[in-house]
Image: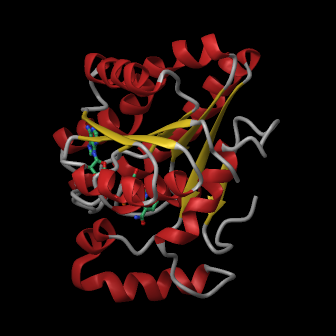
Amino acid sequence: MDFTGKVAIITGASRGLGRHYAREFAKRGASVAVNDVRDCSETVQAIEAEGAAGMMTETDVTSADSARAMADAVLERFGRIDVLVNNAGLYGSLNFRPFEKLDEAEWDKVMNVNVKGIWQCCKAVLPAMKQQGSGSIVNISSLAATYGMPNGLHYTASKAAVIGLTRGLAREVGRYNIRVNAVAPNVVNTDATAEVFGDKRDKVIEVTLSQQAIRRPLETADIVGAVLFLASDLNHMTTGQTLMVDGGTVML
Ligand SMILES: NC(=O)c1ccc[n+]([C@@H]2O[C@H](COP(=O)([O-])OP(=O)(O)OC[C@H]3O[C@@H](n4cnc5c(N)ncnc54)[C@H](O)[C@@H]3O)[C@@H](O)[C@H]2O)c1
């Protein structure tokens, strides 16, 4: 997959999966713009180490103004936007617990970042994509949405909303030759996963593996191929879809 001459934006790319996506787009020739509420300097260094152009903005994806400023900065530096990967999400910092015990403020925050954040970033980049007559948006959902993960109803509901958002938006922008798809990973070995599960991590991985057809834990490198394919020119006519990267846990 060749992204030479293309410009990719990865949200929530200060670490974890976002940083990995950024590096892999850079490796394949893209200029990569990363953003986060946290510092993305190390991600920009990783992009530049691949010989690609990188830039970062401090962006809160829940804010329309912040998302628009991010898109404007990317257009000013790189002149176009070909790919948006909506990776920013609340996951690592969440309190996973039974539905009656979830905190109301945390529920609102999760919906705000994981769902509204995607809408804001899509709104910010779509004028440029429409003008170009091309573009590809990849939204990061989660297997939690299709499997029905217990003890994280806010997270599960938010990631299911990402699938609906993906389908609706794909229908609205397809006429402009813009694709909108989602990727739904199973539990991946990231810092955030370690934060979520703490000392229960090994037990969670054991249960997760028992449900996968391919019985090894998912690493960051296992997810990126799906994101790259959906974003790439190899994908002409797949839109509105959710690609599960789950070692064969949920089969649709
Ligand atoms: N790790 C997994 O097992 C797994 C599985 C399925 C889906 N996912 C999803 O993949 C994505 C990345 O996961 P990760 O494990 O790398 O987690 P992570 O917590 O390391 O990454 C999420 C990033 O989003 C950023 N972010 C949070 N709120 C933001 C905001 N308002 N504006 C901009 N950035 C914001 C965070 O600062 C963080 O850098 C998340 O959307 C997560 O829900 C992860």
Quadrant of the frame with the C terminus: bottom right
From this viewpoint, is residue 147 visible?
no
Q: How is the image coloured?
A: secondary structure
Relative to 141, is 193 on the left or the right? left
Instruction: Name the side, left or right, on which 133 lies relative to 18.
Output: right
Identify whether 228 is placed above or below 171.
Answer: below
Picture layout, residue 7 above or below residue 127:
below
Q: Quick check: 179 above or below 2? A: above
Residue 150 image point, x, y percent: 41, 63
Query: What residue is shown at x 60% (from left), y 36% (from top)?
Result: 5
Q: Quadrant of residue 124?
A: top left
Task: Please state which of residues 62 and 176 is positioned toward the viewer in this rendering.
Answer: 176
The quarter of the picture where residue 233 lies is top right
Q: Quadrant of residue 135?
A: top right
Q: Position of residue 65 (x, y in %)?
A: 27, 16
For the point 40% across and 54% down, which residue is it?
47
Q: Residue at x 38, y 53 (%)?
A: 48
Q: Nearer the viewer, residue 78 or 108?
A: 78
- Where residue 207 appears, x then y in whole percent? 48, 84
Residue 129 in the figure: left or right of residue 41: right
Q: Position of residue 54 (x, y in %)?
A: 38, 43
Residue 22 relative to residue 14: left or right:
right
Q: Out of 205 and 147, give the one closest to the viewer.
A: 205
- Residue at the right extreme? 237
Q: Does the rendering let one see residue 210?
A: yes
Q: Residue at x 29, y 28 (%)?
A: 62
